Amino acid sequence: PADAAGGAVEKPTAAPYGSWRSPITADIVSGADKRLGGIALARDGRLLWIEGRPEEKGRMVIVKEGDKPVDVIPQEFAARTLVQEYGGGAFAVQDNTVVFSNYKDQRLYKQPTEIGSLPVPLTPDYGAPDVSYAGGVFDPHFSRYVTVMEDRRTSNLNPATTIACINLSGGDIHEPKVLVSGNDFYASPRIDQNKKRMAWIEWGHPNMPWDKSELWVGYFSESGELTKRVCVAGGNPMLVESLAEPKWSPKGELFFITDRESGFWNIYKWVEHSNEVVPAYTLDAEFTRPLWVFGNRSYDFLGNSNHIVLTYRQRGTSYLGVLDCDSGLVSLLDTPFSDLSNVVAGNDYFYIEGASASVPMSIAKVTLDKNKTKAISFSIVWSSSPDVVQYRPFFSTPEFIEFPTSSPGQMAYAYFYPPLNPMFQGLPDEKPPLLVKTHGGPTAETCEILDLSVQYWTSRGWAFLDVNYGGSTGYGREYRERLLGKWGIVDVDDCCSCARFLVESGSVDEQRLCITGRSAGGYTTLASLAFRDTFKAGASLYGIGDLSLMRADSQKYDSHYIDNLVGDERAYYERSPINFVNKFTCPVILFQGLDDKVVPPNQARKIYQALKERGLPVALVEYEGEQHGFRKVEYCTNSCLSTSSTLLTFKVVMDFIFTFFTLNRPKTSSLPWSSRWCFSLD
């Protein structure tokens, strides 16, 4: 074995699990990861991407590929939209012009991609960031930009969502012109380059887009109005389907993704003259992800050819291939990535977002042979954490596990990371503690990717478990719908079942099981602590404690989602951890952004106060300026802890959870809980 500097390490030291020293500190974790917010190609074939920088208060910056990547937008701008709160799809590029949504005022701006150019506003200044835009595209027929528009001027809880267009010619600012309206939600307006046609996705309450949606095509008149409209898919009440990612081929054929019939999101094609939908490529695998954010790009056409670069996930692994639309055959491509997402393509090359258990989130350029069936070159052009390679000896490789649930015959899935540190080994008579992570969404999927916030734990002698409980994406509609009406039951049971599965296999210590989660995962964490006795400590990051409050405070996008997951009023009460604080028996730590509109701060405060009154070890850490998800490597002082120190957001989360769990877990089953805890900050 070798240490982080590459030097040889002698025989590993035997030490208790959880006590190992590690070079993967909270400072390393907090400073390591940049975020990705979308990719696009300019006319010169260079890639543009949005890069989120924690060291700049989470600012989302448009960057252009070059010998040295350069920032496109000035320092005072940030490319981020607040449509549906979750955003995404904040910019688009045509030729060498970029249009983007500016975070501070939510207006659209246009500027050339050349360095030194200044953004020019396209949309009016309403005096407040009350109108947002997302998922837009250039309209080559009418010199305009077509986008989803969310207008919150009349109602913040029930804003009007439409598809609108903004004039790009001239220097005047005009009011956006509404093209499509009348439904609750819209996404993915896509315009045919050959003819004056536009495709889009729409859906209405109480559905989420992965429950039921519709694909429409509209025809533009000579003046740019939509005259004729055709429902391509989703309009048949006897066929429930979820539509996503419409895209016009170079020949003017409409491709899209639907989960009709099989329950898996596959690629289909529309036959216009007969208004039929036919499969382009089908497999028991998922070719897209849930539409929580705009801008998903799971496939793209290679230049003007009839070949599609596509990605899909099957049983926990991503695959990359090229589909020949004429033959219907897919040629799989080898890459170092085990998780793949967005792709944009040129003529004989493409860029792909990906990661693996040893490679952080990256963008790679892949060049194909003349037949477009094999990759002849692969190079990383961007990495979220370029310096982490020095810690590779400390990386624990996850094991994909399939485990039985409490439902007879039903299996669920997870990634198990055993403890690993080349300088240490566990004591022979001891098993490691386990930290279980419950992902958010809850319609999300945890993947096999390098995450230093996981390796932080495993390199200290903890085992780590990342669970894809029932309701997770990646395993088809049937698996996803296990959670309908049973949120707080199925997810909790699966997390507890997986932890017990590892205990029974002899992999972890039954007396040292802990759990953590963010957002919806924070709810699963709190519900597991309130309604089960499996775990001995828990950490909730902006988690939901009161389902009724969550429903009352929900913004428009997911205002009915929780009804689908919970059910009637009795279920709302019985599955809310805040109503059963008397059932908590172990320490809890809570983290909360004060600007969070998805899970408002009052939820964490109610849990904190109730547990404090019961005398349980509990802590609440609040962050000014943080929304739903922590983006800043910045300091805050608003904390329910007795400390005057200013605290790094990412660093404090890791250090607090580790210290809290370490000081508040039993060493053996015979030892009582400690009610004394403190935090030591460098």
Image: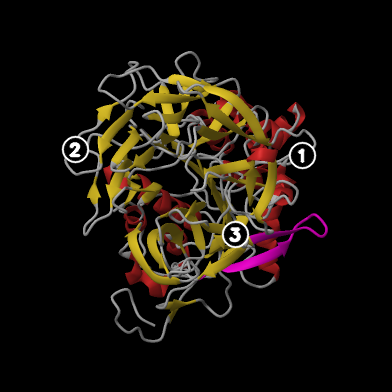
**Which amino acid is tagged 2?**
Ser
Figure quadrant of residue 207: top right
The front one of 416 and 680 is 416
How crowded pointer 2 is (Cα within 10 Å; few <14, some 14-19, many 20+) is rated as few
Rendered image: mark on residue 117 = 2
Q: Residue at x 33, y 25 (%)?
A: 105
Would residue 449 be counted in the magenta stretch?
no
What's the CA distance linking mark 3 and mark 1? 27 Å
Which residue is labeled 3 in the image?
326
Figure quadrant of residue 412: bottom right
Q: Is there any visible trace of residue 637 in the rendered image? A: no
Which residue is labeled 1 in the image?
239
Q: Residue at x 61, y 65 (%)?
A: 329
Indicate which label's residue lies in the foreground, 3 or 2: 3
The front one of 641 and 116 is 116
Question: Height in image: 101 above or below 306?
Answer: above
Secondary structure under tag 2 reads: loop
Circle nearer the N terminus (3, 1): 1
What's the CA distance linking mark 2 and mark 1? 50 Å
**Which amino acid is tagged 1?**
Leu
The front one of 115 and 587 is 115
Provide the residue span drawn in magenta: 397-413
What's the CA distance linking mark 3 and mark 2? 43 Å
User: Residue lying furthest left in this view?
Assistant: 116
Circle nearer the N terminus (3, 2): 2
Question: Height in image: 317 above or below 211?
Answer: below
Question: Height in image: 287 above or below 229?
Answer: below
Secondary structure under tag 3 reads: loop
Q: Position of residue 378 (x, y in %)?
A: 38, 69
